[in-house]
Image (cartoon, grey):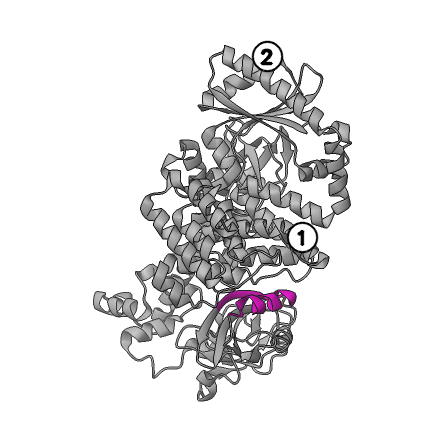
Amino acid sequence: MQEKERLFEELLQKLEPNFSKEDLDDIQKAYTFADEKHKGFMRLTNEEFITHPLQVALILSDLHVDKITIMAALLHEVINNGDTEEQEIEQNFGTEITNIVKSITTINKLELPDDKESSAIYLRKVLVGLAEDVRVLFIKLADRLHNMRTIWAVAPEKQKKKATETMTVLIPIAHRLGIYSVKSELEDLCLKYLKPEVYEDILKQLDTSVEELRDILDGMQEDISEMLIDHGMKFTIKSRVKSVYSIYKKLEKGKKWKEIYDILALRLIVEKESDCYLAIGLIHSKYHPLPKRFKDYIAMPKENMYQSLHTGVFGSDGHIYEIQVRTKEMDELAEKGIASHWSYKEKGTKKIQNMMEQKLEIFRNIIDTYKENDNEEDFLINVNSDVLGEFIYVFTPNGDVFELPKGSTPVDFAYRIHSHVGDTTVGAIVNDEIVPLSYELKDHDVVKININKNSTPSQEWLQFVKTNSAKSKIRSFFSKQDRIRYITTGKNILEKELRKLHLSFAEVFNEEKLKKIQKDLKFNDMDDIYMAIGSFRYTAGYVIRLSTEEKNNVSDALTLKATKPKNIPKIDHKNDIIVGGYNDILITLAKCCKPVKGDKIMGYITKGEGITVHKSDCSNILSKKERLIPVFWGENMDQEYLTNIYVECLNDKNHIADIINKATSKNINVISIHSNDSTTYLVYSLTIKVANITELNDFLNSLYSLRFVKKAGRKL
């Protein structure tokens, strides 16, 4: 039997208990298709290439993923190494699998440009951003695990590069997804190739006593088993010697070999949650526990939903053991993460569902913020900080636990409890000590929030709060306050203008005319009109003329205000754009030409909607002679600007990964990228963020160093 046939048989045997005959037939179809496409391709290990996707599928089968993930894993290299078109995959396997394979193909081309931490963070964000379906990340992790197992076949320089990329980019993602089995093996493999001497030294120290350690573990396992059987408990028990990487991390922190207490570990799998606590009680009654080593991750799960009880005890033989106690479901989740619940969500415990609800609530807050700001980059950053970042757990004085991103403050904590608590916060007490509201909370802090029903948020809080939900709620409060102020101001301005024109409110805003104004300006009520006038979006005169239908015969008051000053020198100013020294005029950057700092610009006074700033050569204002006004960039601004570019490439393959890698090397943030196929060329449209025209031109010029790029420039 050939190796590929043996591997596929092994895969089917693993999948058979959880998949129907129809599912297995579909998987067989995917394997046959991939086998045909990879015919003639070999790996550097001198194996047929098809063995790689088979090994990836086998790794994933241990995680209990769904049929789609297994099929996509078998097909994940057919575009790169099988000369296969996307349309062929879609015709044979449908849109869902095609999208996953496309994403994997793109992601597999991404590489870490250097060993800077900022590059790793950015690549991690791009990778997560491109993986719209979380199953793409499952496949990517399994793909990298098999490649790391066989990385001995490539040059030492590439070994180190891939190990560095795995450690800095992929292992943090595996951690957040809770896939411990993959994360742990990747860590050991990375250490093996990044610090081979350290790795071998630890192995040597373990190997000298490995037989003795196994005997010691077997003895302890037997003693605990007898005790639990005597108490009528149903359980399974496992033992292990601590992983090489885990030992390395302890040694790196300054611990000596003899001070590492959890080299010997036992894991108890019991039937129900209450049995976990009973088992720990029995163990503590026989073996002396180590001080401060007991951890209850059942009552307070980790950020990746990990649940278990941990303790450290002195065995009767004098050795120290780490003991973990959990249910079967908790063990599945601990080893395989959320992947293990992909196909069997309905089997999740109530606790897991509650944790998922907490995650979904965070997502909802981010999405709400995104809808308000319409900023794709902020959305990606918020997802990575609030969902894929590090977390701490803090308590109320009553013992309720809250999960917060690392770096959170008492204000973040207050808003996580309730919006009203956040809005009325006046002080905080952490672990019985008064702290400033900007204090950075630590894991397990007990936090008491002092409130005053007459207090309101401070704008200064926005400078130190960590969570995006808190930022959103603070901004929302001030938006409401601004709205009230603008409505009051707008009402006063409008009434003053009516008196000046000798018009009555009832005459100008009768039911019929009010409906017309609301329709023209897309407003809901009179308050919206007051708000627009008070915030200088529309002038009172313009709104009145909408009612009297004379708006084209009278100069807009905004035009008079903006054009009245002459030859005002450039001055330092808080705004990006300065118009005659004014800072109370609505200014927006034109979406048609997207100017960036350093471009020659011109302001266009819109019909009552403030000033829109265009590039001076923008086709939309070249024909305009009236309503143009000089504007200039502020001197001391440190902003970034969105702009559109195009990259025209040879249509020989997908070049997204190479373009993103080039952007990363230039510290350019790519917000979105889309392709447009033609017979001769492949044209990519990118939205990017740059500080100024110099940075933009430098990036455009750097693109020509890519052999496939024929042309690159600003998109008009």
Residue under the image location 54 percent in, 44 percent down: 176
**Where 500 sits versus 410, above or below?**
below
Q: Residue furthest left?
A: 512
**Where 26 sits versus 707, above or below?**
above
Residue under the image location 58 percent in, 79 percent down: 599
Q: Which residues are magenta?
A: 654-673
Residue underneath mark 2: 285
Nearer the observer, 129 or 526: 129
Residue underneath mark 1: 152
**Where 659 sits versus 458, above or below?**
below
Local packing at callout 1 (Cα closer than 10 Å; few below 14, some 14-19, many 20+) is some
Residue 668 covered by magenta stretch:
yes
Nearer the observer, 532 or 95: 95
- Is residue 235 visible in the rendered structure shown here? yes
**Where 270 sits versus 659, above or below?**
above
Q: Residue furthest front?
A: 1
Residue under the image location 63 percent in, 14 percent down: 287
Label 2 SS: helix
Residue 494 covered by magenta stretch:
no
The kind of residue tagged 1 is Trp
Nearer the observer, 317 or 615: 317
